[in-house]
Amino acid sequence: MIIKSLTVGPIMANCFILGCKKTKEAVVIDPGDEADRILLSLAESKLTLKYIINTHGHFDHVGGNRAMKDATGAPILIHPLDAPLLKQISASAAAWGLSADNSPPPDQALEDGAVISFGNITLKVIHTPGHSPGGISLFTDGYVFVGDTLFAGSIGRTDLPGGDYNTLIKAIRKKLFVLGDDVRVFTGHGPETTIGTEKRFNPFVGQM
């Protein structure tokens, strides 16, 4: 599997490109901004975009949806509980003194347990609410992409509308920590980590 990481936008969100080496089909996870850079990265690896996947609906992770869809026609996938946030991207960004385009409506709803396939790769959707009601993580063998659910040494904010601290802690412990200590965790902001490291050292959810 090809994994490319780009840090985009003024809030420095992580966008991930996952590609199948054999078929050159790809997905983009959380195109928060700088769609031109994302598109260039796809082109450099000769990848064809099959899906645009949002781990949640906050503007710094979905602000590039419109430009990506306009350029590629790829369908937008998001959990139904966060789909309404796609209509509020511009207003949400403005509250931070920033600008972003509202997203086109989603093309497909991602429920817990759904499977996304591209090339010879499959991603399992894990509903991990708490940072937002429809937050999801995406798991494939040895890797999990968690959006703003879990960070290296920290957890996602729960003081935004729809956030809930206890729900987030439960999601991390019951749905992510069971994936295996060696699983690499790609986060929505900051560096990657592993499940084992967070189980042992994360001050919010570690030392189960």
Image: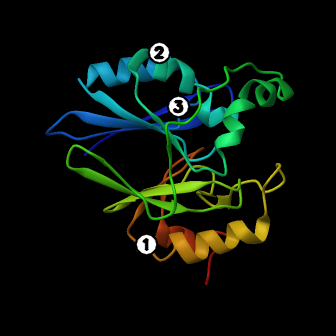
Residue 155 vertical placement versus 177 (above, below): above
Q: Which mark is residue 25?
A: none
Residue 201 shows in this picture:
no
Q: Alpha-carbon neighbours of circle 1 within 10 Å: few (<14), some, or many (≥20)?
A: some
In the image, is 120 to the left or to the right of 98? left
CA distance separating discs 2 and 1: 34 Å
Q: Quadrant of residue 96?
A: top right
Is 43 positioned to the left or the right of 81 in the image? left
**Gap in Å between the C-alphas at discs 3 and 1?**
25 Å
Q: Position of residue 76 (x, y in %)?
A: 49, 35
Q: Are marks 2 and 1 in contact (CB under 8 Å)?
A: no
Which residue type does callout 3 highlight? Pro
Residue with the mark numbered 3 = 31
Is residue 76 visible in this depiction of the protein? yes
Q: Is residue 158 left or right of residue 40?
A: right
At 67% from the left edge and 24% from the top edge, which residue is drawn? 102
**Residue located at (44% from left, 23% from top):** 38
Q: Is residue 163 left or right of residue 203?
A: right
Describe the element under mark 3 as helix, strand or loop.
loop
Answer with the quarter of the image where residue 151 lies. Answer: bottom right
Q: Position of residue 144 (x, y in %)?
A: 44, 58
Does residue 158 lie above or below 11 as drawn? below
Pick the residue in front: 182 or 170: 170
* Mark 2 Cα shell of 10 Å, populated few (<14), some (14-19), many (≥20): few
Q: Earlier in the sequence, mark 3 or mark 1?
A: 3
Q: Which sits earlier in the primary sequence, circle 3 or circle 2?
A: 3
Q: According to the image, label 1 marks what residue?
A: 179
